[in-house]
Amino acid sequence: MSPLPFSLSPHICVLPSPDLTELFASSALPPLPHILQSFSPLPQVTTRTTSLVSVPHTSFALRFSDLAEIEVACQEEEEERAVRTIDWVGARINKRCSKWVEDIEKIGDKGAPRTPWWDELRRCAEGDLVPSKSEGWNHPVAVIFAVSTTAPNPLQAITALHSRNVEFPAWVDPNFLQYTLIVHPHNSPLSDEEAGALFNAVKKQFGLHSYLLPLALPQPPPSAVPVPALMPRLPPHPSLKSSSSTSMASPDLPTHPNSLNTLRMAEIDIQQTARFTREFVVMSLLPWMEKCVVEWNENFSSTRRLPSRLFSSTRRLFGSPSPSPSPAHHPSSSVSSLPSRMGSHVPGSVISPLSPPSQQQRLAEFASMLGDIKLATQVWEAIRKEGKSGSDILPLLLSPSPTLQLHVMNAISHPYTQIPDPPAHAQLRSLKYAVRWEGGIANSDFISNTLEGERWLVWAAGNAEETPAALLLAHAALLSSLKKKKKRAALWYLIAANRLEKCGIKPLTMYFLRRAHELYKDRPQKEVSPLFWEAEGKPPMDIQGIDAIMSGIEHPLGRLLYTTGNVGSAVQLFMGLLRGSSQTSSSIFPSSLHGGASNNASKIPGTDKVYLDDFRVAFSHLKSTSKDGWKLLDLNLPFRFCLERQTCIRFPGSRDERSSGIWQRREDDWKLFLKSRGAKEDLSTKDNALVNDVFWVDLVLQNPLDTEVNLSNVTILVQTSNTGPSQEDFLEVGIIDDVVLSAKELHTVPIYIKSTRPASLSITHAKYDFLSLLPTKESLATRGRRLHDTPLQRQEPTYSPNIIKKVEVVEAVHKMLVSFVDDEHLTLIQGERRSIGLSLSNSGMRPINDVWIIAGPEDEILLDVDDKSAINTPEISETLFSANSLASAMPLQILSAVHEQSVLNPGDNLKVSITFHADYIGDRDLSLLFVYRENESSPFQSAHLTRTYRVNSLLETSVSAQVSHTLDHSFIVDLGISNISSTTIQVTQVTCLSPNWRCIPISEDVIGSMLPSQSSHIILGANWCNEGSGSRDTLDFVTRKLNDVLQGATVEVSMPPPIHVLCSHLSKAQRTFSINLPRIQEFINLGKRNTVSRAIAHAHPHIPDESYPLIFPLYNPASVDFVIFWEINAQRKSGHIFVPGVVLGARHAPLRDIIAEAESTKVKRSMYAETRREKLEILDAVRESEWNAETDPVVLSVQETNVVSHDFDQGPCCTPITIILRNHSSTYASRFMLRFTVHTFLKQISRRYLVPFHVGPLSFRGTLEPLQVYTVHPQLWITIPGTYGLGGWSLETEVLEGPPGRAVRHRYRQEVPLVKDGSCLIVSSIQSL
């Protein structure tokens, strides 16, 4: 075990007589306590334990003090003295730290295990000798009464000292050794024999604890002899200085920091004093202490022989009147009496003002001083278990183990240490504990992983913000750095620096911040695979730490550098702080460092604004004072504003849609068109700037900071490889005066470039002035691709050269400018056909012979040609031949259609008119791609044109259908039209389009003028008409293609078969629009295509849109659509609206077999579905699609009958009713059975109807061929006039397929309910008329 710390050694008070004080002063000697302290520690001292085992001490320390000073110091309040001590320590550190830091930086030994400020803090803590209420280590164990033989009456002086009352408070232990010292100088008036007689008389009167010390004390004093330095002690309080202590100066700061402590004594006097000191310790102090330990141990052992629980049980059972008395202590003549000690003590609490330390505590302290570790440990453990002290000493006595941390935490777990600003006495107590632990435990054990003593120092520092707590953290950081725990050390250095900065100690604050910065930047070597860094895309040493820690280090360090005049270093630190921190960062200064969770879990906001303001102020000051000196600092921003990968070059005619992919889709459509024609020409995608044309570099800037910044003089640097005139002569580059970026803002800054001659330009850098102060440039080059060509390139990451944005400025050989003739905002009405003028100008050097327009698949545009849009058609119907394809419209060729010469020479202008049909409601963009070329051998060039337009709603339409109850029509179709605009419109024509259904108007005068908010319904009768062709082939095509989809196979490249579409017109105008006109037909096909494509995309999201034309046809053979033609005469506007209708007729799940096959087939891979869930979604979509519809084909209806008149005087009336059975299936026959059920009829009939009697057959059977109509006539027997209900009929249907002996495909059953307005028979009597 290491020796106990100096602060745990015996404390001896000295009370010198005035003559002795004058004697030493005249001999140029310090006071007697200082002289005796110079001989401590004593070497080779042996003590004995209670078991008489010798304990050798290589050194035995003693602490001497002046009794008068201790008496005065005990009068001061403990808290007030603690405050003065902390301030005194801070003042000493502040006065010396500049020299210490300077010496350490000169030597360069920053990793030394000891630092001068820690040694100074330790000495200040250990130099405190004033007794404390919380522990007994400073309580005196002996008092030396010292006189000299130069006194007029030495014996009287000794008697006066012994009779003097020791003025200690009641809480100071009165148990101490009284010792008498007689100093006999060479020039004493007493002879040696007289002095010997005096000594014998003193021993006889005051005991054997006496000593006669002969000293020569020559005059003049001999040369000074160096002695150990005295511990610094807190100067006494000015208001408490006594007359006896005014002349006793406490050891404080020496005159010179490097001066040594010396003693001017002769050699013989030194030997005599050393002999006295050893005899005092060996012959008096140690035997007295050993005697006390033996006696106190007997008392302690007697109370520990039987547990207290047994004594309590004995008293309870046998009625013991009082507890047994404890052994009494009989003091000798040199030992004062020991009063009984019954008070308790809890850690951190103050002993009762009238209660000195307990006998057990003094026993433990004496045993610890004498080296009886076994006994000391036993007693300290007993005291600790009673909830008193002991946890602070046990770590010094026990062997290193993890349990010592529990003792440490218990020792410093004072209630005051948990508050943000603990009281001074709690801080001082924790400081003493920490100093003892650090000095009393071997350094190798203290910083081991078992103890982690550096954490003890951090716990002892707590939340205090005074100098001692900061130095505790700093020493903990030093020990952590010795253990290579660099990040932890950096954090503790940072916290220590922040606390010292509040105390105003700048030299040490800057030193600690520098140490934290060095330690935190020293990254540990990460033993990970090289592939890790390659996968992360980072260099091996690019390890980002916690941003708040580095910021917390650099920011206060930068401010201190700025205030001390080192502006250049401050600017560099402030710039390093601007690294683009997050919006919020965690606080790095926890409110508690005691191993528990901090209660303050709040977040501090981003501090970029603070750093930016500090940088602006410091850099402005640096530029104003150093002129061009700031350029030597080589300042570079640690972040980037430019996003080089998003920065792009924009040429005239380009728009923002390029980034969204619109123009790319237009170009893809053009390439597909060329491929379909077998052409090998390609579209030139190389963008070149033209001479004297302005193009732009869209510089994308993003503010990485969480505060607003401004950039001035934003421009780009352009290099040219051409030889000839200087760049300034032909190149013009724009400059943006000021750009303000908000926090995290992304902003695009267009910078124009114009060249007056052909050149090859390289755009290398962006240039700007950061905060209008610091000129900065950023590279716009992007990293090249990763190379994998050679084995070495595959082993080591190798990249191709950086990609630099380049622009070729060429002469305008082929250049066509396109624009709208009228470039105002375009507002259209729903369905309006508007003629739009285009202007084409050849501004190049070569003629243009071929020009095409590529519009979007949803845009409905046609070229205006000389053709009449309406002709007189006397027929009310016509047949339209449709390709039945969903393929997009082909590009429009201009020159061959509208230009007579078919060539556009240089300088020529061409006006082209297109008709645009507005279908979508809302705001949209019309994006047209123009491709042109000179001849077939030259590549196509492109030009872009975009215009925003708005379409306002006009009509609201609805289509519904129901089964007809008459023999004239199969279905009744209701087309509803509502005028939702504010304008009166004229509906001129309604055309019905269907491959298999012909619609005939039932109502008259249904079209014409419609006022705002007016609604109209057109009732049409639909009948099956099989005049056209292609319906059966279309159904087979869809079945085959959907089977490929369900099987996951590649769809065959084939188009749907053509189909004939029946067109039925309803018009009151003198002229009717013929659907066979190319322009009308094309517009209708475009509208139908857009409608069907949207429906397919909604129903089949897993099928790509480019596969629609290969799978689905344009027309469903059973569909019925409408086209409404309208005019607004007041505005001279006209147009048409395509209205998707309904599907009529009965279908019988034609895709049932392929769906069942797909469900039972295990498909390994599918080009439409990657997971089983997607496959099931495709199956459900096909099953629920209109191509797999399933309905009951046979519909029953009761034909309405007029009023039957009958003369009931002649008898009952027998009258038939007509029931119509219609098979709506066009492909399958159906077998039916119609029967009347009385029970069903009674459930359906209302009370207001009479119940008729049925006569004749009540069941009818038969077979209905496709589209066949069959009627039955049941007979009713009427006995009285009235209104009779008709109903109670149930119909069972079987759909047949195959040859004779047909199989049943589907079975249905339906009950015919009573219709509200029909299904009744009114019978009247003739007599009643």
Image: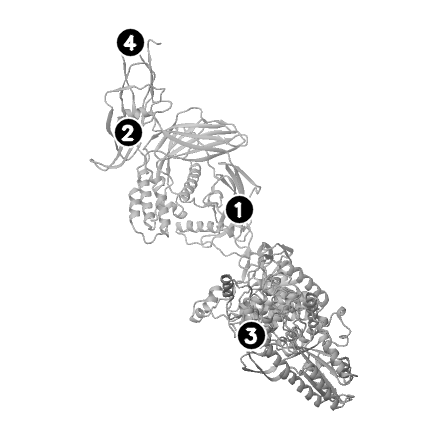
Label 4–label 1 contact, CB within 8 A: no
- What is the distance, in whole Å, between disc 3 and disc 1 at their CAs? 107 Å
**Amino acid type of the residue that numbered disc 4 sits on in the rendered structure:** Asp
Q: Residues within 10 Å of mark 2 (few under 14, many from 20)?
A: many
Q: Residue 248 lies in what quarter of the image?
A: bottom right
- What is the distance, in whole Å, between disc 4 and disc 1 at their CAs? 87 Å
**Amino acid type of the residue that numbered disc 2 sits on in the rendered structure:** Leu
Label of residue 298 in the image: 3
Q: Residues within 10 Å of mark 1 (few under 14, many from 20)?
A: some
In this rendered view, identify the residue nearer to me: 772 or 448.
448
Mark nearer the viewer, 4 or 3: 3
The residue pinned by badge 1 equals 946
**Amino acid type of the residue that numbered disc 3 sits on in the rendered structure:** Glu
In this rendered view, identify the residue nearer to me: 1090 or 840.
1090
Q: Residues within 10 Å of mark 4 (few under 14, many from 20)?
A: few
Q: Position of residue 621 (x, y in %)?
A: 71, 64
- What is the distance, in whole Å, between disc 4 and disc 2 at their CAs? 37 Å
Q: Residue 695 lies in what quarter of the image?
A: bottom right
Earlier sequence position, callout 4 versus callout 1: 1
Q: Position of residue 1210 (x, y in %)?
A: 27, 9
Q: Residues within 10 Å of mark 3 (few under 14, many from 20)?
A: some
The residue pinned by badge 4 equals 1209
Look at the image and tell me in which quarter the C terminus lies.
Answer: top left
Q: Does residue 1113 appear in the picture of this structure?
A: yes
Residue 1229 drawn above or below residue 248: above
Look at the image and tell me in which quarter the N terminus lies.
Answer: bottom right
Mark nearer the viewer, 3 or 2: 3
Residue 88 drawn above or below residue 832: below
Earlier sequence position, callout 4 versus callout 3: 3
Label 4–label 2 contact, CB within 8 A: no
Q: Secondary structure at mark 4?
A: helix
Label of residue 1291 in the image: 2
